[in-house]
Amino acid sequence: LFSGVPTAPVDPILGVSMAYKQDTSPQKVDISVGAYRDGDGKPYVLKCVFEAEKRLLGAPKEYLPIDGIPEFNKLSAKLLYGDAMNGKEKRMVTVQTLSGTGALRIGVIFIRKYLPAGTTVYISRPSWANHHNICKESGVPSAEYTYYDPQTKGLNFQGMMNDIKNAPSGSVFVLHLCAHNPTGVDPTPEQWNQIAQLMKEKRHIPFMDCAYQGYASGDLDRDAYSARLFLNSGFEMFSAQSFSKNFGLYGERTGALTIVTHNEKYIPAMLSQLKMDIRAMYSSPPTHGARLVQTVLSDPQLTKLWVDELKVMSGRIKDVRKKLMDAIVQRKVPGTWNHIVDQIGMFTYTGLNPQQVEILVKKYHIYLLASGRVSLAGLNDNNINYVADAIADAVAS
Ligand code: PMP
């Protein structure tokens, strides 16, 4: 019966992480997965989450409504859009989702069902690989837009603008709110302004993927600049929020999808359809993570603690960037390495090629993506010099 089932390709990120787990070398280093580690290389439960968890001990495990906890949904939208909301909440619908991935998936299904047939979803080149999977599995055409310039290891702004201009009017553009994954390269505010203006002229639809709010700069408002700009510019738009990284809730699958329309009268019908899709897929979302986020965001003291912790986490990553760059430069490794500190968020796109990456993996047991993406969270004072030595050897080989 099942003899014809072909083996699917291994996920490029999770596959590397699996290989790391199987490696028995004491020297092994995991710089593949985008999950925060503290200065000792340990996973970190945020103190604000710990405190919220204490308060929630014994909370009922009843089913949630199909669209999740109403207060969580409100707080999530407010966190992202902040002052830009300013009465626009009437034209927004938010549903609690299975983290950022679930928000993207529900949003893309909505696009397939209710946007004009053939509407294409444009994804940055490169991007988080799951964007393509989600579109493919949802039966939505996807295409790429220019983003990264390997020469400058920065943004190919002109290329991006050309692709926005040349895409058919009314296309969907998946834009990373901040801390672009995998490159760590974000447009400047001035570039965002130009992007928004051109997208408006073309009547494109922004789909903000918000997986790292608070992680890029440690400032929640600053990191939300692009989403607020689009909202203030009058777009109808989508946003997928993940609380995996900024609250450290990876396995709790906590997120939200918000859709903004021009006219509040469409909201009840839109919500009814979102609920239909959710009901048919998984009935209702999980309770715990959303309750944690709700508890933190509705208590000013816990929110302050959270913001302080975000600063610590994003600060440690910035510190690691500098240390890694200094260690590489100290070893006189050919090439320029300032992009390591110029890029932002959890990742650096090192520019190492697949052969060099293979040396790191095979010879040094250092696990990173074949694209050369390094998750800086996996680095600390105990392994930075080892990794820099290995990079020096790989580049020289
Ligand atoms: N978008 C991007 C760009 C991401 O990096 C991630 C996390 N790796 C996600 C979405 C979604 O992650 P999750 O489903 O864990 O919220």
Image (spheres, grey):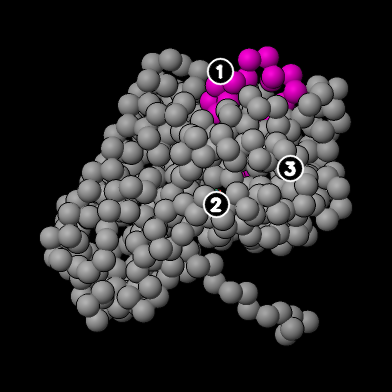
Q: Residue furthest left?
A: 330
Q: Label 3: which residue?
A: 202
Type of the residue with mark 3: Lys
> Which mark sits nearer the N-terminus, 2 or 1?
1
From the Cβ of disc 3, is ligand 1 less than 8 Å away?
no
- Rendered position, 94 above or below 142: above
Q: Label 2: which residue?
A: 158
Q: Label 1: which residue?
A: 83
- Rendered position, 122 above or below 264: below
Horizontal relation, residue 342 to residue 99: left or right: left
Q: Nearer the viewer, residue 49 or 222?
A: 222
Q: Nearer the viewer, mark 2 or mark 3?
A: 2
Q: Residue at x 63, y 15 (%)?
A: 86
Q: Position of residue 189 (x, y in %)?
A: 48, 34
Most common SS among magenta residues? helix
The span picked out in magenta is: 79-103
Q: Is residue 98 magenta?
A: yes
The picture quadrant where one finds residue 3 is: bottom right
Please state, as top left, top right, bottom left or bottom right, where the N terminus lies in the image.
bottom right
Please state, as top left, top right, bottom left or bottom right, where the C terminus lies in the image.
bottom left
Type of the residue with mark 1: Asp
Residue 273 in view, yes or no: yes
Q: Nearer the viewer, mark 2 or mark 1?
A: 2
